[in-house]
Amino acid sequence: MGVYLLVSSNMINNNMKEGLIKDPYELILKEIQTVVTISYILIVAIGMLFTFQKYSKFGINIFDYADIFDFLIAPFSDFKILLFSTITIILVFFFFKLDALYQRKYPKNYSKMNFGWDKKKWFNFYRSSLLVFLFIFYLFLSADVYGKFTKKQIESDSPINLRYSDNENIQGIMIGKTKDILFLLQKEKVKVIPINSLVKEYDVK
């Protein structure tokens, strides 16, 4: 009976140790998965905003032509968008951590900088809301700058030659394309050319 209790006790202790070892790893794994998921959603959202601004500079509402798949791969089809998205996420994370660290290390100075509002119950909500607002404002401002920069870059590109299935050739500067549509700039006109369609083209007014 004593041996049985000893064995049972050892088994329980071993199971508890395994549980203690597994739990931190599972927690870390879940946190990594959450961070990766949120980061991907942010990157896609930023990609959508930047893509919209790029095409809107040419009078194109990209949401009328693109499907969800186009937006899912948009950040990865333009290195500038992916780079900006990654840097933005890192900076936001760093800023949040720095703000929390400063509050913890220098509470008096932090309180003075925030006019003593950090003592109020609503301060955490206020701080989070302010940071989110500034982040969104920064994104829209950056996306607008990106759109203007990209437009100038596109307009300076060399024209391409495009041949239809009936052997008709046209020239223009390629603005971009989706899975089903190609956008071509001819002087001041933007031509929307369906890929693999009986319709040859139509103009964006």
Image (tube, rainbow, N blue to C red):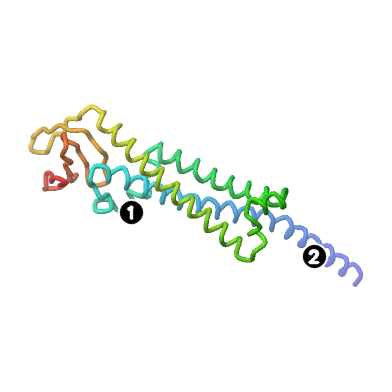
Residue of label 1: 68
* Left or right, 137 with reference to 164: right
Q: Front-most of 132 and 38?
A: 132
Residue 5: x, y in percent?
87, 69
Please give left or right for residue 173 compared with residue 107 in the image: left
Residue at position x 40%, y 36% in the image: 79
Residue beneath the point at 66% across and 58% down: 116
In the image, residue 8 sits, relative to residue 49, either above or below, namely below
Q: CA distance from mark 2 to mark 1?
A: 51 Å
Q: Which residue reaches farthest right?
A: 2
Residue position for label 2: 12
Circle nearer the N terminus (2, 1): 2
Q: Is residue 129 above or below residue 58?
A: below
In the depicted view, which residue is nearer to us: 158 or 155? 155
Q: Secondary structure at mark 1?
A: helix
Q: Amino acid at mark 1?
A: Ile
Q: For residue 172, which numbered disc appears in the image?
A: none
The type of residue carrying mark 2 is Ile
Give x and y (percent) for residue 165: 11, 38
- Asked if residue 155 is positioned above or below residue 14 in the image, the reply reads above
